[in-house]
Image (cartoon, rainbow, N blue to C red):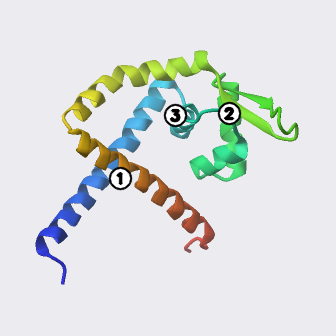
Amino acid sequence: MTDPHRAHLYEELSRESRRYLAAYVLFNQAIADHLGLHPTDVQCLSLLTAEPGPLTVKQVADMTGLTTGSATRLVDRLERGGYVLRAPDPQDRRRVLVSPVPDRIARVTTVWDDLGQTWQALLDEHTDDELEVITRHMRRAHDLSHAQMRRLRSRPKPD
């Protein structure tokens, strides 16, 4: 039998997780609206700038959970907006690499930096041990989310 206190904690965590995720999605939409971008474009730029180097469209697809066709359209939009450049891979001329354009990324970064100060204040309330737990949880949740996306894509869609 499950401990009632732990069951209550799970329920509370589930409720707060749903609220957090919805708030983040809506926050991302507000950022995208402010910048005149699609919400997926904003997240793709965030992911691209978190990587140490350029990525292929296939890697963008894997990273975002999009199909390669959708990732190609996403990169097309970002390229048209001047946010990314495509260039031949010097290691393999058959591949194309996608790189963020620093001057255009600065436009997005300025908005994030302005809003980020309040996020930093929120994090400053935590101990180092708490930050390590939060970071470990976020990393594991990221990995689980990608595994669940792959699982969903392998299933037939419901009627």
Question: Mark 1 or mark 3, which is nearer the start of the sequence?
Answer: 3
User: Which corner quadrant holds the C terminus?
Assistant: bottom right
1 lies left or right of 22? left
CA gap, disc 3 to disc 2? 13 Å
Q: Residue at x 54, y 38 (%)?
A: 47
How far across and down, in percent of the image, does residue 24 sit? Answer: 36, 42
User: The residue tagged with tag 2: helix, strand or loop?
Assistant: loop
Q: Residue furthest right?
A: 93
CA gap, disc 1 to disc 2? 27 Å
* Amino acid of disc 1: His
Residue 67 vertical position relative to residue 119 in the rendered view, above or below? below
User: The residue tagged with tag 1: helix, strand or loop?
Assistant: helix
Q: Kindly identify which numbered label has been placed on residue 46.
A: 3
100 lies left or right of 35? right
Name the one closer to the observer, 102 or 23. Answer: 102
Numbered disc total: 3
Residue bearing the label numbered 2: 54
User: The residue tagged with tag 3: helix, strand or loop?
Assistant: helix
* Amino acid of disc 3: Ser
Q: Residue at x 34, y 24 (%)?
A: 115
Residue 17: quarter of image = bottom left
How far across and down, in percent of the image, does residue 98 sit? Answer: 70, 33
3 or 1: mark nearer the eye: 1
Residue bearing the label numbered 1: 137
Q: Residues within 10 Å of mark 3 (few under 14, many from 20)?
A: some
